[in-house]
Amino acid sequence: MSLEIDNTDVAVQLPGMRVAYDSDSFDESALAATWTEQLQGWLNQAVAANFPEPNAMVLATADANGRPSSRTVLCKGLDERGVVFYTNYTSSKSHDLTATRYASATFPWYPLHRQVTVRGEVEKVNSKETAAYWASRPRGSQLGAWASPQSRVVDGRRSLETALHGIERRFADVEKIPVPPHWGGWRIRPDLVEFWQGRQDRMHDRLCYVRTDDGWHIDRVAP
């Protein structure tokens, strides 16, 4: 894909860039009984609106020294236990998660003026669940997971392609490619799930499911 470059100084325009939100009210009475049901409902609406990759979420982590990183990943599991994504266990994000055992992920549905943030401790997905998801991936994605030394510095694009060609030869006669030992899932087990909806004059609605020793309760926080 080729993009034309506009020489207009966008930086000058930044202070004036804004959208007027005109969403309906979103109050406690509109919430589902559980954060899982509420997230599934909003995700269903994002899917129905034909958004590209409605399951995309921005994953934020920090290393052992508190230095943050963020990147977009795809949610591949959602139930009462938490939200799941898959990655290389030797990647930067996995090193962060191993060090801190904590993460935050935000689903940004901009056209709906909505976002959902899930925050909590993390755990690795068990091998049975990982294998089931792995089997659903296209063969090319499976080969890429074997070939790519995720987050490591490489000499160039050619070195990646060479590695992929080598993996293709290695598994050329293998019908079912096995899960790499360095690859699998992470689950964020939330202690807080915030549902944000844009409103007029920046008086946004922010409703949070908060886990306590006595179960879940609802907090409204100021925009």
Image (cartoon, rainbow, N blue to C red):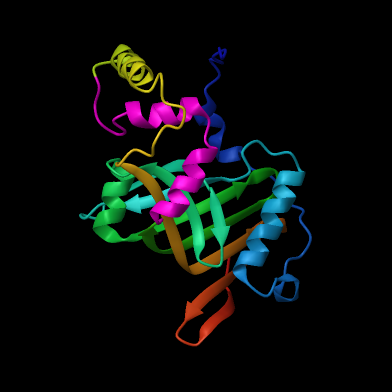
Dominant secondary structure, magenta: helix
Farthest residue, direction bottom: 214
Q: Position of residue 192 (x, y in %)?
A: 49, 69
Residue found at x 52% / y 52%? 106
Judge left or right: residue 207 versus residue 159: right
User: Where is residue 121 drawn, in percent x and y?
Assistant: 38, 65
Toward the viewer: 83 or 134?
134
Q: Is 125 in front, or is 107?
A: 125
Quadrant (top left/top right/bottom left/bottom right) for the C terminus? bottom right
Give yes or no for residue 126 being in the magenta stretch: yes
Quadrant of the image containing the N terminus: top right
Give the answer, above or below, for where 8 lies relative to 176: above
Q: Position of residue 110 (x, y in %)?
A: 65, 45
9 to 194, vertically: above or below: above
User: Do we see residue 8 in this rendering?
Assistant: yes
Q: Magenta span covers which residues?
A: 125-154
Which residue is found at the position 38% from the left and 61% from the top? 122
Marker count (numbered):
0
Residue 7 forms part of the magenta stretch: no
Q: Residue furthest left?
A: 65
Image height of 144 relative to 50, above or below: above
Does residue 20 appear anywhere in the picture?
no
Give the residue drawn at x 68%, y 75%.
33
**8 or 158: which is nearer to us?**
158
> What is the x, y in percent for residue 59?
44, 49
Instruction: Residue 53: name its quadrant.
Output: top right
